[in-house]
Amino acid sequence: MIPVIAIDGPAASGKGTLARRIAAHYGLRHLDTGLTYRAVAHALVAAGKPLDDDAEAVAVAARLDLSAMDRAVLAAHTVGEAASKVAVMPAVRRALVERQRQFAETPPGAVLDGRDIGTVVFPEATAKLYVTASPEVRAKRRYHEILAGGGEADEAVILADIERRDARDMGRADSPLRPAEDAHLLDTSDMTIETAFQAARATIDRALERH
Ligand code: DC
C-alpha cells in the first residue's frame, strides 16, 4: 500500500503549514481537503444558489477539478464560514470524500489535511496526526498573519469566529472533528512550526518503518 499521512485539527491550528512541509519532506502529494469544501461553497455562492442546496452542491463536488482550486480566492474568511455550512450535508461529504480517496490512492502517496481524514476518509492511513492549539493561541496566530499581510483585524472577533467554527465542526452529526483513536496528538500552543515539524517527523518516520 502507498503511504497516506492523515493530518486533522481545528481551524487555524497550523495543520496546513505542517502538511505542506511534511509532503515536501517525504516527496508526497498534498491535498488540503478544506479547500474542496471551500470550492463547493464558493461555486454555490457564485451561482446564486443557497448553501443548503445539496443536489447542486453534490453536482459541483462531482465535477470539481482538484488541481485548479485557487487558494487565494478560497482563503477568504466568508468562504470558510460558508464551507463549514456546506460541510454538514452528508451527500456533499460522500461526494468529496470519494474524490479525496482517489487523490490519496494515486502514487507516490499523499498527505491529506482536514477534519475527518484519520476517522473517515482514510482510517487505515499510515500515520495520523491530530494538530491542535488553544483557541486563544490560534486567534493570535491568525491575527498576526492578517497584520503581516497588511490587513486589519480585531483579535476578539477572530477568537469568537474560531470558537463558533469549532462548535460547528465538532458538533455536526456526520463526521464531526475529533481525533482518531490511534492519532498522535500534537498540541502546538507552545511550539514553533519547526518544533512541530520535528515532532511530526519523528512520528511519521516510526510509522513508515512499520509500513
Ligand atoms: O480547514 P478549512 O478552514 O479550510 O475548512 C473549511 C471548512 O470545511 C471547515 O470549517 C469544515 C469543512 N471541512 C470538513 O468538514 N472536512 C474536512 N476534511 C475539511 C474541511
Image (cartoon, helix red, strand yellow):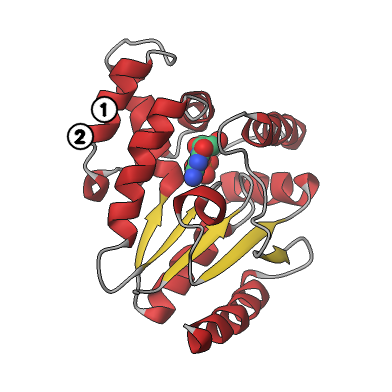
Q: Which element carries disc 1, helix, strand or loop?
A: helix
Q: Residues within 10 Å of mark 2 (few under 14, many from 20)?
A: few
- In percent of width and height, residue 18 lies at 54, 66
> 67 or 93: nearer the eye?
93
Query: Mark 1 belongs to which amino acid?
Result: Val
Q: Secondary structure at mark 2?
A: helix
Give left or right: position of 105 versus 114. left
In the rendered picture of this protein, how many numbered marks are placed on residues?
Answer: 2
Using the rendered image of the protein, determine whether residue 150 is visible from the camera's viewpoint: no
**Residue highlighted by disc 2:** 63
Q: Is residue 89 above or below residue 122?
A: above
* Amino acid residing under circle 2: Arg
Image quadrant where residue 169 sits: top right
Q: Residue at x 37, y 18 (%)?
A: 54
Picture layout, residue 131 above or below residue 82: below
Left or right of residue 186, residue 35 in this image: left
Mark 1 surroundings within 10 Å by alpha-carbon count, few (fewer than 14), some (14 through 19), many (20 or more)? some
Kindly check if marks 2 and 1 are in contact, taking CB atoms under 8 A apart as contact.
Answer: yes
- Direction from residue 141 to residue 20 in the image, left or right: left
Residue found at x 62% / y 29%: 172
User: Residue 188, image x and y in percent?
Assistant: 72, 64
Identify residue for label 1: 60
Position in image of residue 145 (x %, y %) = 59, 50
In-image side of 115 versus 42 (left or right): right
Q: What is the quadrant of the N terminus in the image?
A: bottom left
Label annotation for residue 176: none
